[in-house]
Image (cartoon, grey):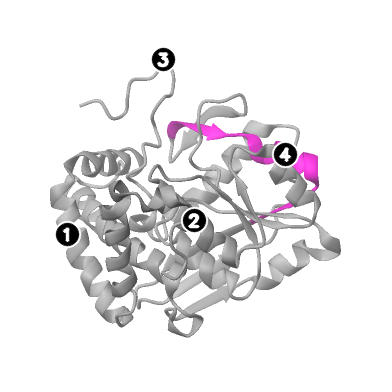
Amino acid sequence: MSQAAATPSLRHPRHWPMWCGLAVFWLLARLPWSVQTSLAGVLGWTCYHLLPVRRRVARRNLELCFPEKSPAEIRRLTRAHYGALALGLFETCAAWWAPARRLPAHEIAGLDNLTRARAGGRGVLLLTAHFTTLELCGRMLNETERFGCLYRDPNNPVLADLMRRRRARGMSVAVHFDDLRGLIRALKGGEVIWYAPDQARRLKLSALLPFFGVPAVTSTATSRIAALTGAAVVPYFGRRRADGSYLLTILPALDNFPTADAEADALRINRLIEEYVRLAPEQYLWVHKRFKARGPDLTDAYAR
């Protein structure tokens, strides 16, 4: 953790607990990866039993999205998700602090699709979703292909500062998720931007569209951004395989995109994300309230 707090205010005693916690994980990140995965299993089990509020959110999301699964299957998948969340914490530490030689085994499939999309200096939206593996898989891809990202600061200022520093060190550009002009400027300048539109807010560029067959507030901004910039939209997904290695898949740029129907485009993206969630459902971020704030015509999906 050689890059300490950027400003004196972040050294205030009220932030010391967070610094101590980060120091612990910085030390844990030096352990062999097999030890870290074992510790993640313990941490996941502990959090599953100690954090009932988010456990209920995850379970409700899984019930809605996989109605064909039995209650016992939903419980097992929820527990597996907590294991993936805990391992995601160690994966994030590896992404921020591990040298390239110590990253877990991984494979990148379809890198030529990104190369073709960038031909002639064209900008690229590297379309993905919020999986627990996103930080580590992003680091793995960044070792081969430099790209930028959209970001949203976490609430804790120490964590936000550290996240900005680590990403700025390896990425070509970092654009705040509310900075539409900055995103358009970067794409017109030929940047590749990591972009995950699956956590939308009820704004002008949104619509209520099915996600796993359940109405969810869905961003329709992808079409507008692609139309304004001429950027290619290249789907990209990373997941951890059963043997502990990682597979990063880059698909061909979406053809016939954008169309004149932004909602149809957004539904197409939802279905693509669904396809890759099904490959490793425990690794999607189910603790996020995906089906909230849907308007007065729909009941609160999380009310119990």
Q: Which residue is mark 2?
A: 6
Residue range (magenta): 214-234
The residues bearing labels 1 and 3 have C-alpha atoms spaced at a distance of 37 Å
Q: Residue furthest top?
A: 296
Considering only order in the chain, which callout, 1 or 4, is on the residue closer to the N terminus? 1
Query: Does residue 51 belong to the magenta stretch?
Result: no
Residue beneath the point at 32% across and 50% down: 15
Looking at the rendered structure, the kind of residue marked 3 is Asp
The residues bearing labels 4 and 1 have C-alpha atoms spaced at a distance of 43 Å
Q: Which residue is mark 1?
A: 45
Q: Which mark is residue 149?
A: none
Residue 118: tell me if it is visible: yes
| Residue 88 lies in quadrant | bottom left
Looking at the rendered structure, the kind of residue marked 2 is Ala
Q: Where is 206 relative to 98, above or below?
A: above
Q: Quadrant of the C terminus?
A: top left
The residues bearing labels 3 and 2 have C-alpha atoms spaced at a distance of 46 Å
Q: Which residue is mark 4?
A: 181
The residues bearing labels 4 and 3 have C-alpha atoms spaced at a distance of 34 Å
Q: Nearer the viewer, residue 292 or 135?
A: 135
Q: Position of residue 74 (x, y in %)?
A: 23, 48
| Residue 224 lies in quadrant | top right
